[in-house]
Image (spheres, grey):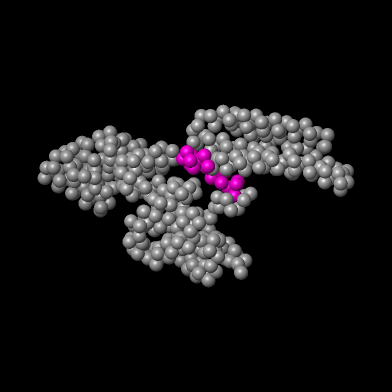
C-alpha cells in the first residue's frame, strides 16, 4: 500500500497550465504526507530491514517532490522580475524538501549499519546521498568478493575410536582430497554406517550436496549434523553459506554470527561475514576482521592462493573506504608480487591508483598489464574509461 502511494506520487505530473499547477502541487504534497505517515507505521515495527527500506523510500518521495517543484514549467508571460519572484517561491518550497530527503537517507544509513539492516535499500540510500555530496559514502567501484567459504576441515576424532572407524575416516579424507564423486559418497557412507552422527562425515556430505547444487539435501544433512552437534562453529558457517546461495542474506548473517559466538577466533566465518559488511560499505565492522584474516593468509599470496588473494583485495578495499589508501596500495602490491593474475584485483588496484591516489605512472603500468593479459571487451572498456580519466590528471 505504501509503495502504491509512492508510485501515485511519481506518476502525477505538474502541468504547464498555471491555472492547474497549484491544485496538482497540493495533491502531490498530500500524497507525500500520506506516504510519510504510512512509512512511520513501518518504522514502528523496528525491523532493521524494514526500517532501512522505509527511510530510503521516504527520502525518495521527498527528493522526487523537490525535483518536481524545481522542474515545474514556469508560467508563461512573466517578465524578468516576476520570474525571479516565482523562482524564489519555488526555492522556499523545494529546498526544505531536498534537505529532508538527505536527512532521511542519512537516517536510513545510520540505522541500517547500527541495526545490521544490510539490503539493497541501504545501498540505494548511499547512492542517492552520494549524488548530492560526492564525499559521502563514495562508491569506488571496487570489485568486492563475497566470500562463500565452506569449512571442510577435520572436525575431531571418531566417537568410538575403533581402528576400523579410524581407517574409514582416513579413507574418507583421502577420497575428499581426490575429489572423485563415487569414492566420496562410498567412503562417507562407510563412516556413517559405523557412526550415524559422525560430525566430519555429515559435514562433508552436506558440502558435497552443496557443490552438486542440491541445496535441499545439503540443508537436511547440515541440520541433522547440527542437531547432533549444536556447538560446532563449522556447521553454522556452512549453513550460513547455504543461506547466502539461496538468497536469504538475513539468515546467513545470523548463522555466521552464531558461528563466531561459539568461537570468536573462527577465521572462516569471520572473513565470510566481513565480506558482507564490506559489500554494504560498513568499513568500520569489516576492517578489523579483514585485517586479521589478511594477516593469517598473507603467506599464501606468493602462490596466488585464490582465497588469500580475495581476502587481501577486500582488505585493501576496506582500507580505502576507511581513509587509508596508501596501506591499501601496499596490500595490492603484495598480491601482485605473487603468482596471482586475477583481473578483478588488478582492476581494483588500477581504480585505486587513478581515482584515489592519482598516481599516473604506476596506473599506466597496471593498465598496460591488464590489456596484455585480458581480451575481455568489458574489461577493456573499463581500462579505456580509466585511461581517459588519467588524461585529466595533471
Where is residue 168 shown, x and y percent of the image? Answer: 16, 45
Residue 174 located within the stretch drawn in magenta: no
Residue 123 located within the stretch drawn in magenta: yes
Quadrant for residue 229, please give it: top left
- Toward the viewer: 181 or 237? 237
Q: Judge whether residue 76 can be spotted in this image.
A: yes
- Toward the viewer: 212 or 301? 301
Q: Judge whether residue 332 can be spotted in this image.
A: no
Where is residue 99 shown, x and y percent of the image? Answer: 66, 42
Vertical order, 80 against 226 (above or below): below
The residue sitting at 21% across, 47% down in the picture is: 172
- Disc count in the image? 0
Name the residue at the left extreme: 163
Vertical order, 253 against 335 (above or below): above
Quadrant for residue 98, please give it: top right
Q: Is residue 149 left or right of residue 51?
A: left
Vertical order, 143 against 28 (above or below): below
Where is residue 204 shown, x and y percent of the image? Answer: 27, 44
The residue sitting at 28% across, 36% down in the picture is: 230
Q: In this view, does 347 lie to the left or right of 254?
A: right
Where is residue 246 shown, x and y percent of the image? Answer: 42, 40
The residue sitting at 47% across, 38% down in the picture is: 115
Q: What stretch is highlighted in magenta?
A: 110-130
- Toward the viewer: 247 or 260? 260
The residue sitting at 62% across, 43% down in the picture is: 102
The N terminus: image quadrant? top right
Main SS, magenta region, reads helix
The C terminus: image quadrant? bottom right
Q: In this view, does 9 lie to the left or right of 17?
A: left
Amino acid at each position: 500500500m505504501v509503495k502504491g502511494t509512492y508510485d501515485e506520487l511519481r506518476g502525477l505530473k505538474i502541468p504547464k497550465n498555471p491555472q492547474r499547477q497549484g491544485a496538482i502541487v497540493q495533491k502531490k504534497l498530500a500524497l507525500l504526507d500520506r506516504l510519510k505517515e504510512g512509512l512511520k507505521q513501518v518504522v514502528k515495527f523496528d525491523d532493521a530491514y524494514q526500517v532501512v527500506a522505509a527511510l530510503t523510500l521516504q527520502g525518495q518521495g521527498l527528493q522526487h517532490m523537490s525535483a518536481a517543484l524545481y522542474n515545474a514549467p514556469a508560467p508563461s508571460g512573466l517578465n524578468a522580475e516576476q520570474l525571479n519572484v516565482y523562482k524564489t517561491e519555488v526555492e522556499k518550497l523545494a529546498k526544505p524538501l531536498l534537505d529532508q530527503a538527505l536527512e532521511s537517507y542519512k537516517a536510513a544509513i545510520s540505522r541500517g549499519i547500527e541495526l545490521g539492516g544490510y539490503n539493497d535499500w541501504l545501498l540505494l540510500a548511499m547512492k542517492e546521498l552520494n549524488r548530492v555530496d560526492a564525499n559521502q559514502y563514495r562508491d569506488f567501484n571496487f570489485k568486492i568478493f563475497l566470500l562463500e567459504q565452506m569449512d571442510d576441515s577435520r572436525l575431531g576424532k571418531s566417537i568410538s575410536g575403533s581402528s576400523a572407524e579410524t581407517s574409514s575416516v582416513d579413507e574418507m579424507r583421502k577420497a575428499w582430497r581426490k575429489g572423485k564423486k563415487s569414492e566420496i559418497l562410498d567412503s562417507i557412507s562407510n563412516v556413517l554406517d559405523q557412526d550415524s552422527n559422525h560430525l566430519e562425515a555429515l559435514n562433508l556430505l552436506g558440502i558435497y550436496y552443496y557443490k552438486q547444487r542440491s541445496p535441499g539435501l545439503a540443508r537436511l544433512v547440515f541440520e541433522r549434523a547440527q542437531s547432533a552437534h549444536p556447538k560446532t562453529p563449522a556447521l553454522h558457517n556452512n549453513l550460513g553459506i547455504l543461506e547466502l546461495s539461496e538468497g536469504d542474506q538475513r539468515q546467513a548473517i545470523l548463522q555466521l554470527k552464531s558461528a563466531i559466538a561459539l568461537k570468536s577466533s573462527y577465521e572462516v566465518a569471520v572473513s565470510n561475514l566481513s565480506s558482507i559488511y564490506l559489500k554494504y560499505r560498513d568499513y568500520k565492522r569489516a576492517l578489523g576482521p579483514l585485517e586479521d584474516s589478511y594477516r593469517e593468509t598473507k603467506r599464501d599470496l606468493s602462490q596466488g592462493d585464490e582465497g588469500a588473494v580475495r581476502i587481501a583485495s577486500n582488505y585493501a578495499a576496506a582500507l580505502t573506504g576507511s581513509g587509508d589508501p596508501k596501506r591499501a596500495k601496499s596490500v595490492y602490491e603484495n598480491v601482485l608480487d605473487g603468482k596471482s593474475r586475477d583481473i578483478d584485483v588488478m582492476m581494483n588496484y588500477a581504480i585505486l591508483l587513478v581515482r584515489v591516489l592519482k598516481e599516473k605512472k604506476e596506473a599506466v603500468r597496471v593498465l598496460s598489464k591488464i590489456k596484455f593479459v585480458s581480451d575481455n571487451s568489458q574489461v577493456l572498456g573499463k581500462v579505456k574509461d580509466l585511461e581517459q580519466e588519467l588524461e585529466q590528471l595533471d
